[in-house]
Image (tube, rainbow, N blue to C red):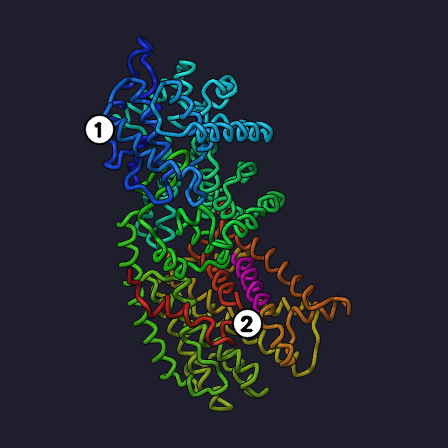
Amino acid sequence: MFEKTQLSVSAYDTAWVAMVSSPNSRQAPCFPECVNWLLDNQLSDGSWGLPPHHPSLVKDALSSTLACLLALKRWGLGEQQMTKGLQFIESNFTSINDEEQHTPIGFNIIFPGMIETAIDMNLNLPLRSEDINVMLHNRDLELRRNKLEGREGYLAYVSEGMGKLQDWEMVMKYQRKNGSLFNSPSTSAAALSHLGNAGCFHYINSLVAKFGNAVPTVHPSDKYALLCMIESLERLGIDRHFSKEIRDVLEETYRCWLQGDEEIFSDADTCAMAFRILRVHGYEVSSGHLKDFSTALELFKASQFVIFPEESGLEKQMSWTNQFLKQEFSNGTTRADRFSKHFSIEVHDTLKFPFHANVERLAHRRNIEHHHVDNTRIFKTSYCFANISNADFLQLAVEDFNSCQSIHREELKHLERWVVESKLDRLKFARQKMAYCYFSAVEISFSPELSDARISWAKNSVLITVIDDFFDIGGSEEELANLVHLLEKWDVNGSPHYCSEQVEIIFSALHSTICEIGDKALAWQGRSVTHHVIEAWLDLLKSMLREAEWARNKVVPTLDEYVENGYVSAGLGPVVLSAFYLIEPKVSEEVVRSLEFHNLFKLTSTCARLINDTRSFKRESEDGKLNSVLLHMIHSGSGTTEEEAIEKIRGLIADGRRELLRLVLQEKDSVVPRACKDLFWKMVQVLHLFYMDGDGFSSPDMMLNAVNDLLREPISL
């Protein structure tokens, strides 16, 4: 499927090609094989088109059928087929005015134009003259409206429906290097019939040679199909099984992007998708080509990867897509929704879970459950790409998800036993959130071979939750100092002094976990990294101790002082660093000490601290704790409202998130491996989900469904 695009043929476009007369005789078809295909491929109900007809695509069937009838009438063939086709049109003509029906692009111009041509050819249409006159009148109104709005390109695209009304000199301005008009066989065939253009002939002739006796509705379309295929594999969570094939497609797409390939830049969907997919995979591509494109869903997705300062104007320019999509799909009653509920679901999920909050594994599950193998799309007529959605993708995705989930369930049981064996469950002040901690570990690294990274991530997350509660409410001043001293000393062989059982439980669990991570990391990295993990934990404990001292002494730091300490106390240091050492590829001491690594960590941790603050502001204020929202209100003067302060902090989060994404996607001059950088971005995604509707830890039911979907409930379709 990576080697060959599988695109359905189009009865509608084949009919227009069949109508082209031979350059040697206007009484003979130029492509008789296409005429024969029409004779052999009428459907049982008398129509032509993509079988089986979608119930909302009757207009599409009417358009295809009438085009086929015109071709047969043109050559005086298929009397029996024509009779059945006319009966189909008569039986279904009322659908013309049915607003529940999906209207193909250009239908209100093309279909009346074909009716007019049929009358000129003395085709005995079983239609009332009043209905025909209404259609032609509405067609003229539509033409005038489009001309007034300056939609020249659109009117050129629907040329086959305009005939003598068309300005063919204008139309040929849109001819592409391959000789086609808009890569559309029907438009190109109409131009060939009217003008005898050599480029159009070359294009049509090459299509017939390539596809045989029928043509698709758009060609070429390989790049679009392959990009859609990559997106399908990524959305279903099975792309890791096709990494080489995907890399080959991306390399070729990037080469074509740099060369200004017409197949990419002349189509809005293809350009926006190529931009988004290339950029997310680390290719440096400019967003300048997106400025004039208006395919709302794909453009909205692409706009989330506008990450450079010079692109801020474009980001604002494209923000209308958000409002447009919300408006169009909010009530679930649009024609697009009735045609494909799956598209409406995709729009809903894209709006609810933007890229920065769309955690990977839950998204995979949603996409699997909503995946549909009937991938009908529509331009001037309906068509299907077998490469984009099919049963094989779905079957592989379900089996892969459930197989991974069974591994995750066993790991969760192991971790729950560890909590009991470490006596952490005896600490009554501490929140017991193992399932949530392991949930985040799976979202960061779900592949079976990354078990060490998940176990490390979950254990560190549990310990950070316990220690955070210890510093907030569970520990005395003496106990906090004792815990920090024990970690500073790191007396492996001695007999450490514990001032309380609580300190002994916490430090013993912390000590054994750090040693376990060190042993596993040695196997992955080929060098000892225990000292670095201890250092990360010590930085965390000291930052927590500083906040405890602020609270005890009623110190009010500046916002900058709070954030500078708070990004460390957010607790991501030991979690991310330990996982860093337990995935491929190996990372040197120089990499983890680099400015790039520090910036990645600081941006991620600052986002974590500020996201937490905006969601827990009210609760923490009632508990007498400081956070960034309250500090901004204090230091900005009495005129600053709570809403203004929260909005200010959200702006800081957005700026930091954009800069983080830029660093993650940056390939040039980057020393941190992409697989490692992805850990930081995935952490931000988990945080945004976790705090989407409040504080996931403090609202016990908030994350329950997510945990069940990811860890406990297999997919059953």
Between residue 398 and residue 624, name the one nearer to us.
Answer: 398
Is 254 a magenta residue?
Answer: no
- Left or right of residue 382, residue 606 in this image: right
Q: Residues within 10 Å of mark 1 (few under 14, many from 20)?
A: few
Q: From the image, tell me which residue sits under label 2.
A: 539
Establish if 620 lies above or below 118: below
| Residue 713 falls in image quadrant | bottom left
Establish if 433 lies above or below 687: below
Q: Quadrant of the C terminus?
A: bottom left
Q: Which residues are magenta?
A: 597-612
The local secondary structure at tag 2 comes to helix
Q: Position of residue 110 (x, y in %)?
A: 44, 28
Q: Residue at x 52, y 65 (%)?
A: 692
- Left or right of residue 268, residue 418 in this image: left
Mark 2 vs 1, N-terminal side = 1
Q: Position of residue 667 (x, y in %)?
A: 48, 46
Q: What is the C-alpha distance between the residues marked 2 and 1? A: 76 Å
Between residue 436 and residue 179, name the one nearer to us.
Answer: 179
Q: Quadrant of the N terminus?
A: top left
- Left or right of residue 626, residue 516 in this image: left
Q: Is residue 335 visible?
A: yes
The local secondary structure at tag 1 comes to helix
Dot 2 amino acid type: Asp
Q: Which mark is residue 40?
A: 1
